[in-house]
Amino acid sequence: SQKIEQNSEALNIQEGKTATLTCNYTNYSPAYLQWYRQDPGRGPVFLLLIRENEKEKRKERLKVTFDTTLKQSLFHITASQPADSATYLCALEEQAGTALIFGKGTTLSVSS
Amino acid sequence: NAGVTQTPKFQVLKTGQSMTLQCAQDMNHEYMSWYRQDPGMGLRLIHYSVGAGITDQGEVPNGYNVSRSTTEDFPLRLLSAAPSQTSVYFCASSYSQHGWGETEAFFGQGTRLTVV
């Protein structure tokens, strides 16, 4: 079955630096890959979606890449701020027609 | 437009009790799903539905029942609560019509369930 691996449980960076989070999947190559943000005690909130034929997607300080050959997505936050501190989750379909499954997430801490 | 509403927010059950976690959405979304979230385990899919009358199992369906009689509601029933079902439960909905991945999912605020 499909497995999603996010490179690390925790990432600590200084304010102003670029945070890079990794999401790898093992089997079925999805047509779409999504990224969510989750704050403590809250439900996940959608950030970005990237399609398999898109190499890169940007939204303000966020950038997502999708490499179907490597079965990997990278999520970048440029000029990071303490307010960016949260857990970031990647998600995709386990297989075509099934519901989204999520990685365990990477908790980002941005210190000032 | 309230989005996805889950009730209750907190619940304590005794082992063996049954209960229903409610989930309602007012966005006319066909796709709805239930997840549980445990420390170190991430979000795990319990059940999902692509429309009224259609449900399917996810990764961890044992001990849970669902039904989808209306587009708006997708309740999750615990048949006989066990301590292993202590978790935070999230309901989500999506506008997708051709696949779960093609549009964003909207999540409720979660139900924190403790089984003693």
Image: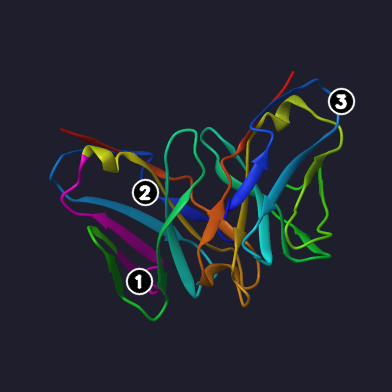
Q: From mark 3 to mark 2, how far is it between C-alphas? A: 39 Å
**Element carrying mark 2:** loop
A38 part of magenta stretch: no
Query: Residue drawn 78% across and 28% down?
Result: B82
Which residue in the protein does label 2 denote? A7
At mark 3, the secondary structure is loop
Nearer to us: label 1 or label 3: 3
- Residue that badge 3 annotates: B16
**Number of other residues with Cα within 10 Å of mark 3, as a class: few under 14, some 14 to 19, many 20 or more:** some
Secondary element under disc 1, as helix, strand or loop, is strand
Q: CA distance from mark 2 to mark 1?
A: 15 Å
- Using the rendered image of the protein, determine whether residue A12 is visible from the camera's viewpoint: no
Q: Chain of mark 1?
A: A
Going from the N terminus, do you reach mark 2 or mark 1 first? Answer: 2
Magenta part of the protein: which range? A64-81
Circles 2 and 1 on the same chain:
yes
x 36%, y 63%: residue: A73
